[in-house]
Structures are given as structure tokens and as C-alpha cells.
Image: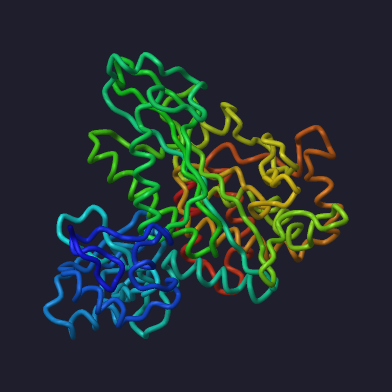
Amino acid sequence: MATLRATGMREDGRDVHTLPASRLERVFGKGSGEWTIDDLLAFVREHGIRLVTLMHVGGDGWLKTLDFVPRDYVHLRNIITAGERADGSSLFGNLGIRTGRSDIVLRPRVETAFLNPFSPEPALSLLCGHFGPAGAPLPESPDTMLVNAYERARRETGADLHALGEVEFFLGRGPEEADMYGENDRGYHATSPFVFGEDVRRRAMVLLAEMGVPIKYAHSEVGYVEPTGDDPVIWEQHELELSLQPLPRAAESVLLTMWVLRNLARHAGMRCSFAPLLREGHAGSGMHFHLSPVVAGEHLAGENESGELHEQAKWLIAGLSRIGGALMAFGNRDASSFIRLTQGKEAPSAVSWGKFNRRALIRLPMVATDAEGRPVSPPTIEFRLPDGSAHPHLLLAGVAQAFVAGGATEELDSFLARASLDESGGGDGVGRVPRTPREVSEQLRAHLTTFSAGDVMPVHALEKMIEHFAAM
């Protein structure tokens, strides 16, 4: 039998303890915010790690990777502390990075380290930010925009904005006789053998938890697409809902979730799709975000003891109502996004908000309570417009800017009353959700100053996005 080691792991690398969920937190015996470079160096030495990979988000919203085989511990320390240079024009050309200033630096964040579960060789991965030649954060980096927006919101509202993503996805493979159970709109919370992707979904949950990505729950969803002559693949839908985190970590968790799901599907001989719409007439994949302003450790997305919304909740709802259409530039980036919105299937069409109302663009979901009525999870405000084409960093940066703008709304209560689906009953809210890319372009231009306020989103980057949607 393998003997136990001081790190809490067996000699064969298997973990002894099951909690906390993150493997490195179990190994180090402390939370990720307390990790040091020396912790990582010792881990590499003791566990025979050969590869170090620096991962980061590109302008297209996909994870990128730069790989190293450290020569010695000096080289390893330099990688972790200083990072490495890269070509910013190849990463952020779509966000208007300036010609002649395309040399950038990837700089790792120690607290994001995890063991890469898909590397044949033992590999330590770290997520990175982007910096320019002068050592300042790169303005065109989605990571920089989100960090700046998050910090600005903290300064100007006094609240720490948290978020979680509902990651919907389809798994597809060739049909088999056992697939006779599948049927459209009957997949919600279905279990094996009525769905074939359950093992992939559950494996994803375990791997993400080991990597330090907190998860609320996962289940199969309603979507089901039968094979046809044009598409001989059978598709079924699943959802993985994450847990609330500060905005920058929430965006990273969404990207890591999509990366893990794609890898697992490939290894299982399946396909994984986050497309807003696989086929007209069928449910597409949304990516709703739940949001919560936090002040002094208290989540204020719900109501106070008098049954009135907290002020911070009002600001967030007002901001999302005012510029929700413009946020589609970051949250609905595919041509099929607009087909999904116009065909219904619980996709919102009017800019409105409501309690528990799934027809609203912004809603306040009910909160589960125990037998004594105590809530077992924080209240949230759900933004239901984004879909699987979303760029999570840009979207949450825009949400933070909307939060600040919402706090400056004149006659706030009157505006919220007009936008309320519950009060108006008509569902018209304060406007219509854009139905074409050109309308999104117009909305983004109309709110250009809101997104660029505080030097959060560079105007030239926003102009590139406006041009892109105008030309779609």
C-alpha cells in the first residue's frame, strides 16, 4: 500500500483528503489567496512537475497557452514572477492594439495555479494578466478591462460585485439504439440512461473543483436535437452553474469551464457546442449571469427586512436596464444569437425586470431556504440576455460599468417602476432588445461614454467592436 506523505498525498499522487475541493489547497493546507511562489516551487520539486503553462484570455474570448520546460529553479522562479513576452497584435488585433506597441508581457497570478488535468506530462498551469512595454496593465487586454471595471465599481459604489455564470452546452455524438429515450423539451434534470452525457458532465464538475473552480450544481437541460441528413449528430443539452466569485475570478471560471468541457468531450469521442443556436426551432444555449453586490460581507441583491430592494440592487437593475442592449456586443457575438432571441424559447425580447419572472431580461430568482426559513445561498440578480458566444471578461467589465451608471440614474424608483414587468404587466419595459447586429452597433455607440468612463474600456477598442457589428 502507498504510504502517506507530509503533503497529504500518497506516493502514487492520489489525494488522501476530499475537502477542500481544490487539490492544491489540500496540498498546501491553506486558501489560494495565501499561496506563495515558494509554495509552487516546492510543489514542482516534490511532485516531479516537468511543464509549466501560462494561460490567458485572448481578444476572441478563448483561453491561450504558452508552455515551458523549466531548465532549473532560477528559470522556474523567473517564469512565475516575471512571465514572458508575447505578440499582442496576434492576441488583441480585434480590440485595436496600436501598431508598434504590440510587444506585451504575460504575468502569472500565483493564486490561480492548478494542475493541468489533460496534460500527459505533469504540468502546472497559471492564469496571467497582460502588461505593456512600460510595465503598466495593457489597456486592450480583456483581463485589464475587467480588473479596472471591477476596481472602479468598488471605489464608486462601495460594493464588491460578485458573479456566477450558468454555462449551458450541447454534447453531440453519433446516434445509437440506446438513444431511443431522447425527446425534445424532456431533458430537464433527466438522468442516465435518458441522457448519454451524464458522465462527461460529472467528470467536468470534479476536475473543475480540483482546479479551484467553485461549482453550485449541474444537470441536464431541455434541449435535444435529433440527427438529420444534414447533421447526423444527436445533440443533448446540459448546464453547469458555477458559484459566486468576485468578477475577475468569475470570468476566469467560465473560460476554464468551457475549456474543460471541450477537452472531456474530445476524449469521450463527442462534440461540445456552446453555440447560441444549433438548429432553428430548438432551444439554444444561453449563458445567464447571476450578480450580487457585496458590502461588509453581506449580499445585497435582494430585499431588506421591509421588503424593499437594497439600494445597490436598484443600481444594478437600473444599469442593466439602461444599457442592456449595448451589452450584447460582449454577450451575444454570433449571428445565431439574434435568431435565438427572435424565436422565443424563454429568451427575453423586452428590456424589463421582474421577480421570479422568466420572461424578464433581468429577474430576481427565488432563494432556497431551510425548514426555519434561513436562506442557504445568497440572493442574486439574474441577467438573462447573454448566450454561449459571450466573451465573459468583456461582458462582466460592461456589467460593472452598468452598475456604476445605474447609481447615477435620475428618479431611480420611477425608472425601475417603468422597467418592471411585474408592475406594468405589458412586458414592454423601457425598450426592445436589439434584433440585429446593426442595432447592437448603434446601442454600443450610444453608450460609448458609459463603457469608456474611468478609462476602463479604450475608445479605440470599442470603435473596433462597433465596426464589427455594423459589418455583420
Q: Residue 156 location, x and y as percent? A: 68, 74
The residue at the point 66 percent across, 63 percent down is 293
Q: Is residue 220 left or right of residue 293?
A: left
Q: Residue 128 location, x and y as percent? A: 35, 70
Q: Is residue 456 left or right of residue 179?
A: right
| Tally of numbered discs | 0
- Nearest to the observer: residue 445 or residue 313: 313
The residue at the point 72 percent across, 53 percent down is 317
Q: In the rendered view, would you say 159 is above or below 132? A: above
The residue at the point 32 percent across, 81 percent down is 37
Q: Quadrant of the N terminus?
A: bottom left
- Nearest to the observer: residue 229 or residue 207: 207
Q: Residue 195 location, x and y as percent? A: 39, 26
Q: Residue 94 location, x and y as percent? A: 38, 58
The residue at the point 44 percent across, 24 percent down is 224
- Nearest to the observer: residue 30 or residue 423: 30
Q: In the rendered view, would you say 259 is above or below 133? A: above
Q: Is residue 306 left or right of residue 393?
A: right
- Residue 428 seen: yes
Q: Quadrant of the C terminus?
A: top left
Q: In the rendered view, would you say 356 is above or below 138? A: above
Q: How is the image coloured?
A: rainbow
